[in-house]
Image (tube, rainbow, N blue to C red):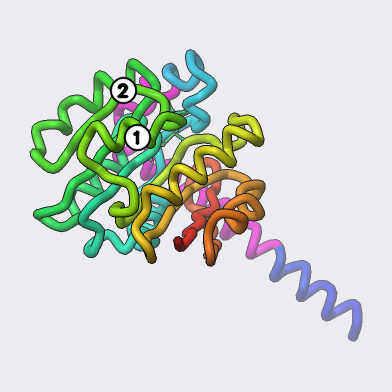
Amino acid sequence: MERKQSAKTKAGLGAGIKNGFKKIGNVFQNTIKSDAKIFSYLKTFADDKGVAAVMPSSRYLVSRTLRAMNIKHATKIIEYGAAEGVMTRKILEEMPKDGKILSVELNECFYQKLKTLESDHRMSLYHGDVRQIDSIAKAHGFPAGEIDVIVSGIPFAFLSAEGRAELLSKTSDLLKPGGRFVAYQVTTHLIPILKNHFREVKIQFEIRNIPPHFVFTAFK
Ligand SMILES: C[S@@+](CC[C@H](N)C(=O)[O-])C[C@H]1O[C@@H](n2cnc3c(N)ncnc32)[C@H](O)[C@@H]1O
């Protein structure tokens, strides 16, 4: 009886693992199909460790992140680390017509590619480091205390402990009361730090991305 049950458990586990691999395979296929520029992204990753991801966010991670942003109601948005603009393009598609977005990107190659998005009058682009987001936002007409959502794909793990705390403090200052900071990250190390700066933190996980990511929504 016990042996029978353990065989059943093993079979269930085997099917679960097989299903998991199948899902990851689908994500890989979709990413390749939907983005022929994947190898140029990989090259940028190889040249700059700050890029931190081997390929752009999958459509599953993008849509989970946009839901966390409550995108239809976000009229003032700041994006940290836009890379090639996979997330940015979808944000522009879904955000209100009278909204505004400021995207900040450090990598020169990605910044040059993002310039095409500036044809949308709602989009402002800045080539630089988000650690100076307080002055960058002010210079672009995004005043402290008025931002609905800040979304981030930058690798927080690469910042020093002081750098992380300072950036999260600037992030919180920029948000309006009730505003949200949405960060998609590979690890959970940011959770306790977010809890020091925000009143509530929601945690989600998206497996259909390479690599799988957590999506944290922190409320001011
Ligand atoms: C994981 S990628 C972002 C993925 C992208 N948003 C997407 O959805 O495909 C991280 C990006 O953050 C940028 N980045 C890293 N550190 C940064 C910083 N301090 N300031 C601005 N951008 C930064 C990198 O150049 C890279 O493009």
Quarter of the rendering containing residue 105: top left
- Secondary element under disc 2, as helix, strand or loop, is strand
Q: Is mark 1 within 8 Å of ligand 1?
A: yes
* Residue located 41% across and 29% down the image: 132
Residue type, label 2: His
Residue 49 percent across, percent down from the top left: 54, 21
Residue type indicated by callout 1: Ala
Residue range in magenta is 14-42
Residue drawn at point x = 63 percent, y = 50 percent: 193
Mark 1 element type: loop
Crowding near pointer 1: few (<14 within 10 Å), some, many (20+)?
many
Q: Quadrant of residue 37?
A: top left
Residue 107 on image: x %, y %: 39, 20
Q: Is residue 158 above or below residue 96?
A: above
Tell me the quarter of the image containing the C terminus.
bottom left
Label whose residue precedes the other's in the sequence (1 or 2): 1
Q: Main secondary structure of the magenta part?
A: helix
Image point (33%, 53%), residue name: 145
Disc number placed over residue 82 in the picture, else none: 1
Q: Give the residue at x 61% y 35%.
A: 157
User: Which residue is nearer to you in this view: 212 or 137?
Assistant: 137
Position of residue 173 measured from the top left corner of the image (x, y, whole percent): 42, 49
Q: Is residue 172 above or below residue 210?
A: below
30 drawn magenta: yes
**Closer to the camera: disc 1 or disc 2?**
2
Image quadrant holding the N terminus, namely: bottom right
- Binning the other alpha carbons within 10 Å of mark 2 as few (below 14), some (14 to 19) or many (20 upward) gives some
| Mark linked to residue 127 | 2
Residue 93 appears anywhere in the view: yes
